[in-house]
Amino acid sequence: MAGTDVPAAVCTFDVRRRGVPQKGETKLKLVVIDGQGGGFGRAIIEALRAKGYTGEVLAVGTNTLATSAMLKAGASAGATGENAAAVNAARAQVIAGPLGLVMANSMLGECTPAMAAAIAQSPAVKVLVPAAKCGVQVAGLAPKPLGELIDDAAQKILALLEQQDG
């Protein structure tokens, strides 16, 4: 009975499969992951919605505050925690968020080694916004205000999603 009365567009995953879609399940196009207060994720989602993106956006927060901020910004659904990040990173086609997502113990320890590994190893295209707080300098990247970086990330995400639809 389970699954027979559920529309194909609804994803029900067994987390033991670490996000591998099964028959009748769909891959997520866009997963936005953030921690702390969810400011990066919120800004990315707001920029995408302002540019007219109406597709599904799954917000994954390392904590409930981050998830809540992204949901208020217009995310379609939300999930919280390390397992949510690992499972949904494996299902995503595009992952967006701060650069610290692929660095273990970043974001004041909220990004666990398992979370960073799952995101880094995901086959999804990653659109990561550099932040001075990460303690990482990206060579060849001119310093820009955060608003410009967010706008650039939103444009890249939209181009990637268009490319995948085409």
Image: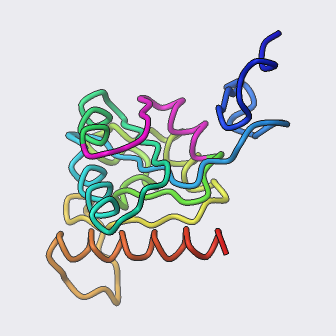
Q: Which residue is drawn at 18% across and 69% down?
A: 146
Residue 156 vertical placement versus 114 (above, below) = below
In the rendered image, the quadrant that contains the C terminus is: bottom right
Indicate the position of residue 91 as horizontal and vertical percent values.
65, 46
Question: What residue lies at 85% left-to-right and 37% top-to-bottom?
Answer: 23
Percent from the top left, x then y, of residue 8? 74, 35
**What segment carries the magenta color?**
73-89
Name the residue at the left extreme.
Answer: 145
Q: Is residue 80 magenta?
A: yes
Residue 26 or residue 129, whichever sits in front: 26
Farthest residue, direction top: 1
x, y (%) of residue 102? Answer: 46, 55
Q: In this view, does 15 lie above or below 39?
A: above
- Is 14 inside the magenta-drawn segment? no
Q: Which residue is drawn at 49% across and 41% down?
A: 113
| Observer-nearest of 32 and 35 | 32
Residue 111 versus residue 132 in the image, above or below: above
Q: Position of residue 27 (x, y in %)?
A: 68, 47
Q: In the depicted view, which residue is nearer to us: 21 or 121?
A: 21
Tell me the quarter of the image containing the N terminus: top right
The image quadrant that residue 15 belongs to is top right
> 105 or 94: nearer the eye?
94
